[in-house]
Amino acid sequence: MMASRAAGGHAMGAARELTGAARHAAYAAGQAACVAHVAEHNLGAAAYAIKAARAGAAEAEDCAGRLECAWQREQLPEAIRDVVIEDQRRRNDICWRVFECPLP
């Protein structure tokens, strides 16, 4: 866990110097590496990845974000899908409302 958190810290540090999609992608990587030990923080990496998709899509940002969100949900194992989607619904406001996408 210490090595993972250190790598995540480097990604988060690198993100500060970046802009747009690259910045959000670096934050997604850092968040994923840093918070594996805290289930309540698990949505950060997914939210940043959706923000990266939006930022990289220019004019179709909302569509790109919804597609990324839907793709993420399709990757969830069935055994935890409902729990994760409920968590997204509950914490959507603090995650930039990025989890407003069609259910799988």
Image (cartoon, grey):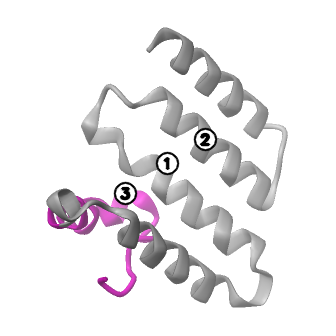
Q: Which comes before the other along the chain, label 1 or label 2?
A: 2
Give the CA separation, mark 2 to mark 3. Answer: 19 Å
The residue sitting at 41% across, 59% down in the picture is: 95
The residue sitting at 78% across, 32% down in the picture is: 14
15 left or right of 45 in image: right
Q: Which comes before the other along the chain, label 2 or label 3?
A: 2
Reading the image, the residue beneath label 2 is 29
Q: Residue 94 carries which label?
A: 3
Q: What stretch is highlighted in magenta?
A: 82-104
Q: Which comes before the other along the chain, label 3 or label 1?
A: 1
Reading the image, the residue beneath label 1 is 45
Chief secondary structure of the magenta portion: helix
The image quadrant of residue 102 is bottom left
Give the CA separation, mark 3 to mark 1. Answer: 13 Å
Which percent across, then down, holds residue 18?
83, 45
Which percent across, then down, holds residue 55?
72, 70
Q: Residue 67 carries which label?
A: none
- In the rendered image, residue 95 lying in the magenta stretch gets the answer yes
Q: Do the residues labelled 1 and 2 touch (CB within 8 Å)?
A: yes
Which kind of residue does numbered mark 1 sit on?
A: Ala
Give the CA separation, mark 1 to mark 2. Answer: 7 Å
